Amino acid sequence: MKLALGTVQFGLDYGISNNNGKVDKHAVFDIINFAKKNNINTLDTAVAYGDSEKIIGDIGQHFSDNFNIITKVTPFQHSNDIDNLTKPYNLQNQLNSSLKRLKINSIYAVMLHDANELTSDNAKKTYQQLLQLKENGQCQKIGVSVYTTKQLDNILNNFNIDIIQIPLNIFDQQFNQIELIKKIKENNIEVHARSLFLQGLLLMNISDIPPFFAPYKEYFQKLSSFCKDNKLSKLEACLSFAKSISFVDKFVVGVNSLNELSQIVNAYHKVRPLEFSTFSSSCTTLINPSQWPTKE
């Protein structure tokens, strides 16, 4: 199963299409239990995902042997005090805290949450801290979450990493490049893709899409027509796209309910891979959520 379970909604009110807020803890138990029964064996979390790690730790004791857990860290301390925004933060201490919240002794992978941390002046020191975590036996793999192909190419040229997370969906296909894929595979790097549904934007009815995306109406209309012609739901189209991408090892999907995860799993087994290359866009205000208006 190439699906992995993203957990940001367990700790935060996240997603442009999410009207229900953070997932209830009892619902999280049901979601994780369903994932286990359906051969989803990877949980993706982060220090920045509110109390997601703690919730996984509280619930995960029932499923601790069934999942590879990945967390994301930052070498800088987040603080409301502006004087502390660039204060170095010990990754060892941060991982220790994460493991304590998760109630485990070691983790499948640790990734830097921001790829810029491996392109900054402190990159070598940060990388050495990551290596030390692996040498200590506290994680099997180290890596980074990237946002652009330029970031990834820079990192691949300078560091030996084991795992990456990239954005990839019907509109954002920037990483689906033959030479880049070849480089990734030559280095035996595990690839996880996030944003398969673009925070749920790709699943929304055209009438419900926020006004901010009005300049891109033609993209959504084209997707709707494609789905109609191929007798697919938008969910099925997104999962059909995922099945067409062979270089990705895991697609990280976040859900707000057990019903959503059930629909995703059922659709994933149902659909066949189709060609989506003509949907690719380089418009960053469409494909990069960091450039969207802040959710109120």
Image: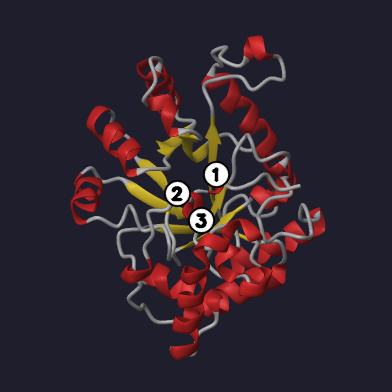
Q: Is residue 172 left or right of residue 202?
A: left
Q: Residue at x 70, y 54 (%)?
A: 62
Instruction: Please determine whether, in this image, residue 251 is positioned above or below residue 259.
Output: above
**Mark linked to residue 284:** 2
Q: Position of residue 221 (x, y in %)?
A: 50, 76
Q: Position of residue 226 (x, y in %)?
A: 44, 82
Dot placed on the residue nearer the N-terminal end, 1 or 2: 2
List x then y, in percent, for residue 293: 64, 46
Q: Quadrant of the N terminus?
A: bottom left
- Indicate the secondary structure of the residue bearing disc 3: loop
Which numbered disc, 1 or 3, marks the residue closer to the eye? Answer: 1
Assign a secondary structure to mark 1.
helix
> Is residue 20 among the parts visible in the rendering?
yes
Indicate the secondary structure of the residue bearing disc 2. Answer: helix
Question: In the rendered image of this protein, does residue 266 appear above or below residue 76?
Answer: below
Q: Considering only order in the chain, which callout, 2 or 3, is on the residue closer to the N terminus?
A: 3
Q: Amino acid at mark 1?
A: Gln
Real-space CA distance between mark 3 and mark 2, rounded to the nearest whole angstrom: 14 Å
Kindly indicate whether the residue at mark 2 contacts the one at mark 1 (C-beta within 8 angstroms).
Answer: yes
Q: Is residue 178 left or right of residue 131?
A: left
Nearer the observer, 27 or 153: 153
- The residue positioned 20% from the left and 46% from the top of the image is 183
Q: Which residue is mark 1?
A: 291
